[in-house]
């Protein structure tokens, strides 16, 4: 795969023990038909990207060379670099990723028409304006890392719309939310981390993938958790979050349908609709402590979080991590039982069965294990007489006269058992 490798190649690393164990990688199974469609489409449009797949268990050295940890993993190999795909696993998203990453790192925008075309197609994109400069080198460096997430263009000053006012050149701009922002080398820190923070629209429909990506940014993320069938909460409150936009640079707004994902993330049980504010830099979160009636209320809530008067929950303390381990183990067991009850019974029933047999064995060995063993050794004809003897022993037990007989016999039985 790696040697003499010149063209672009997109691979997916699968993880298949065999068909029987396939439930372990349910995501692999779900992706397989989508992946086949991606392959067909890339071929039919004559894309230079070749699509393949690889069983990571058969090629474990290649998989580990590429740092494959979870399954399925999608990577696009371009020159010496391997780009990870982490977005939603839909055909369109994967193909869009392949086009973006396989194409030019910095795409020139030669005309105003081209600029307008790009503006219509992309909600967020970055533009470098100016000639050769150290800033351009940094821009290229940042792009080679962040092309997996967003688009990078370059243009001359005449090409950008008239409403863009530049104090100095060269400059890096982000266009989003119907406006633009200019990178400030002195205030915004290094270019890559600025791009990483600015590559999101201010208001987003959240899902697990997005939250995972936002995790790199250290932002505060305010999420309205709603029932998708009843958006009245959104209409009355959260759309107005947008009015708060850029109240604080590191605030991100959005909503999420249903509370399944967020409950798993927070290990909590939220009633919807509600608002959760996550601090992505320390995994703490803040929950609404009252009814939110309007946008001012929301601003107040955010301000209270910022000034520290709302109590933080969660975090990444050792206690939280332990809680996470227990929580994950519990949900793994539940999901195994849900997807395949038979397998669940086998997996957890077998060890439990063995343990209970062992416990039973230990229990009986301590009490009357000797007798049981002895009974198996005697022939059927002897059983009756043996039982009669035992019966008589028990009858004799309480009386002082016969008490000597069992006390002599019992140690002998234990010894015999140990010899075995
Ligand atoms: C929708 O949610 C609101 C609370 O946000 C509630 O008052 C209303 O009754 C809900 N409507 C329906 C149809 O469930
Ligand atoms: C979020 O976490 C960071 C890092 O621990 C901390 O400095 C910051 O104050 C937190 N923000 C809020 C609003 O609690």
Image (tube, rainbow, N blue to C red):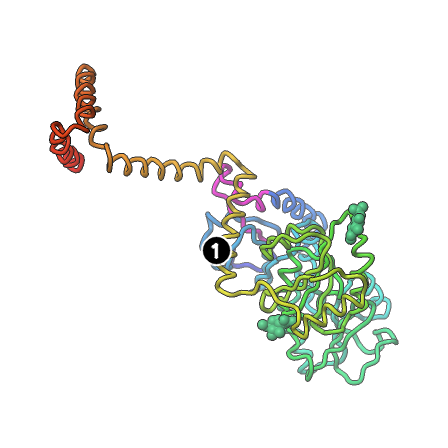
Q: Position of residue 272 (x, y in %)?
A: 71, 52
**Residue named by callout 1:** 62
Query: In the picture provided, is 103 more to the left or to the right than 109?
Result: left
Which region shows up in magenta?
A: 11-29
Q: How many marks?
A: 1
The residue drawn where x is 68% and y is 55% is 207
Secondary structure type for disc 1: helix
Q: Position of residue 44 (x, y in %)?
A: 71, 47
Is 157 above or below relative to 409?
below
Query: Which image quadrant is residue 199 in?
Result: bottom right
Please tell me which residue lies in front, 30 or 303: 303
Q: Position of residue 258 (x, y in %)?
A: 70, 50
Query: In the picture provided, is 60 more to the left or to the right than 214?
Result: left
Name the outermost residue toward the front: 400
The residue drawn where x is 74% and y is 49% is 227
Please tell me which residue lies in front, 372 or 329: 372
Q: Is residue 304 magenta?
A: no
Please tell me which residue lies in front, 205 or 107: 205
Name the outermost residue toward the top: 381
Is 261 above or below relative to 298?
above
Confirm whether residue 332 shows in the render.
yes
The residue carrying pointer 1 sits among few (fewer than 14), some (14 to 19) or many (20 or more) residues within 10 Å by Cα, namely: some
Query: In the picture provided, is 197 more to the left or to the right than 83?
Result: right
């Amino acid at each position: 795969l790696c040697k003499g490798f010149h063209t672009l190649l997109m691979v997916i690393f699968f993880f298949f023990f065999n068909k029987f164990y396939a439930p372990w990688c349910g995501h692999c199974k779900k992706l397989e038909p989508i992946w086949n469609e991606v392959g067909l489409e890339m071929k039919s449009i004559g894309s230079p990207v070749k699509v393949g797949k690889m069983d990571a268990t058969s090629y474990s050295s290649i998989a580990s060379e590429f740092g494959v940890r979870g399954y399925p993993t999608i990577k696009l190999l371009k020159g010496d670099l391997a780009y990870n795909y982490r977005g939603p696993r839909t055909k369109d998203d994967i193909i869009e990723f392949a086009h973006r990453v396989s194409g030019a790192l910095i795409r020139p925008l030669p005309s105003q028409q081209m600029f307008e075309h790009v503006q219509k197609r992309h909600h967020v994109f970055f533009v470098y304006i100016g000639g050769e400069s150290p800033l351009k080198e940094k821009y290229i460096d940042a792009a080679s890392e962040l092309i997996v997430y967003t688009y990078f263009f370059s243009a001359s000053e005449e090409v950008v719309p008239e409403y863009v006012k530049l104090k100095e050149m060269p400059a890096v701009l982000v266009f989003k939310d119907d406006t633009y922002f200019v990178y400030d080398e002195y205030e915004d820190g290094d270019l890559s981390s600025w791009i990483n923070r600015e590559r999101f629209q201010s208001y987003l429909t959240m899902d697990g993938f997005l939250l995972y990506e936002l995790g790199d940014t250290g932002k505060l993320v305010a999420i309205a958790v709603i029932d998708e069938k009843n958006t009245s909460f959104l209409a009355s409150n959260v759309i107005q979050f947008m009015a708060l936009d850029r109240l604080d640079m590191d605030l991100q707004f959005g909503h999420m349908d249903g509370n399944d994902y967020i409950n798993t993330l927070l290990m909590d049980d939220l009633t919807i609709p509600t608002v959760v504010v996550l601090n992505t830099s320390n995994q703490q979160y803040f929950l609404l402590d009252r009814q939110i009636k309007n946008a001012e209320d929301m601003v107040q809530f955010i301000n209270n979080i910022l000034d520290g008067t709302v109590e933080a929950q969660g975090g990444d303390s050792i206690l939280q991590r332990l809680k996470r381990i227990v929580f994950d183990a519990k949900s793994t067991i539940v999901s195994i039982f849900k997807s395949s009850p038979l397998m669940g019974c086998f997996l957890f029933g077998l060890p439990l069965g063995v343990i209970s047999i062992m416990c039973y064995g230990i229990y009986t060995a301590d009490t009357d294990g000797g007798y049981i063993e002895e009974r198996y050794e005697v022939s059927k004809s002897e059983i009756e007489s043996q039982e009669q003897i035992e019966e008589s022993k028990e009858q004799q037990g309480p009386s002082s006269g016969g008490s000597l007989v069992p006390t002599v016999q019992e140690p002998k039985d234990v010894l015999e058992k140990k010899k075995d």
